[in-house]
Amino acid sequence: MKKICVFCGSSLGKQNIYKETANELALFMAKNKIDLIYGGANVGVMKVIADTIMDNGGKAIGIMPKLLVEKEVAHEELDEMHIVSSMAERKELMIEMSDAFIALPGGFGTLDEISEVLTANQLRISDKPIGLLNIDNFFTPLLNFIDHCVSEGFVRKEHRRNIIVSSEIDDLIDKMDQYQPLSMGKWIDDIKQESSSN
Ligand code: AMP
């Protein structure tokens, strides 16, 4: 993995551990020559991770829609900045340019991005690993909800297993390195069969 797209909060969150772990991830990426792709902002955890990677010899690439640049939240010092026309185009370019995705704690923007890449994997528009860094169990309620979606028959078990989770950076990256994309055929056949038998 040469380029990892990190989804994270445009806020800092209430606990210091969010910022500290973003710093640790940035140091890990700089040390291992992994470029950061992210939303391009100069606010919240987004700014923390970009600044730390650049201060430690790594590379930060921002992808930002014009409307956010106009709101003056663009980070002016990045190694590269791609300005796109919409939030949808931003996510498309993030998927195209990155080798993998890691989500840190965040809000709706982060949840939207996680959901986008999980759906793209499910539809095999993308087959890149997706990891959630479960800092202080931040994502556990979301994972519980996804388990509920599985038990209610709306998310397939194999797609739930597609979500890579760890509370440790090294372990998350190891698991992401070992990721084997799912083949699409079977579950589409299953869905068609389920629908035709009702
Ligand atoms: P949130 O989790 O709601 O704070 O949103 C953060 C995520 O959504 C980031 O990964 C960004 O790509 C995108 N995003 C949301 N708000 C902003 C912002 N003010 N500036 C840049 N990107 C943002």
Image (cartoon, grey):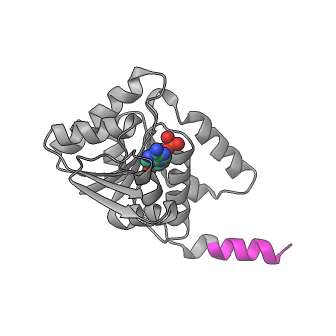
In which quadrant is the C terminus drawn?
Answer: bottom right
x and y percent of residue 95 in the render? 41, 63
x and y percent of residue 132 in the render? 45, 43
> Across the whole image, how many numbered discs are drawn on residues?
0
Principal secondary structure, stretch drawn in magenta: helix
Q: Quadrant of residue 129?
A: bottom left
Residue located farthest toward the left when viewing the structure as drawn: 57
Location of residue 188 with respect to 132 vertically, above or below: below
x and y percent of residue 5 in the render? 36, 53
In this rendering, would 20 be left or right of 153?
A: left
* 62 drawn magenta: no
Between 196 and 29, the residue placed more toward the observer is: 29
Between 99 and 108, the residue placed more toward the observer is: 108
Q: Is residue 170 visible?
A: no
Q: Is residue 38 visible?
A: yes
Location of residue 158 with respect to 33 vertically, above or below: below
Range shown magenta: 188-198
Q: Quadrant of residue 83?
A: bottom left
Location of residue 84 with respect to 37 vertically, above or below: below
x and y percent of residue 148 in the render? 70, 45
Between 52 and 72, the residue placed more toward the observer is: 72
In which quadrant is the N terminus drawn?
Answer: bottom left
Residue at 54%, 39% (x, y): give it: 107
Between 67 and 169, the residue placed more toward the observer is: 67
Residue at 35%, 48% (x, y): give it: 74
Residue at 34%, 34% (x, y): give it: 22
In this rendering, would 50 be left or right of 166?
A: left
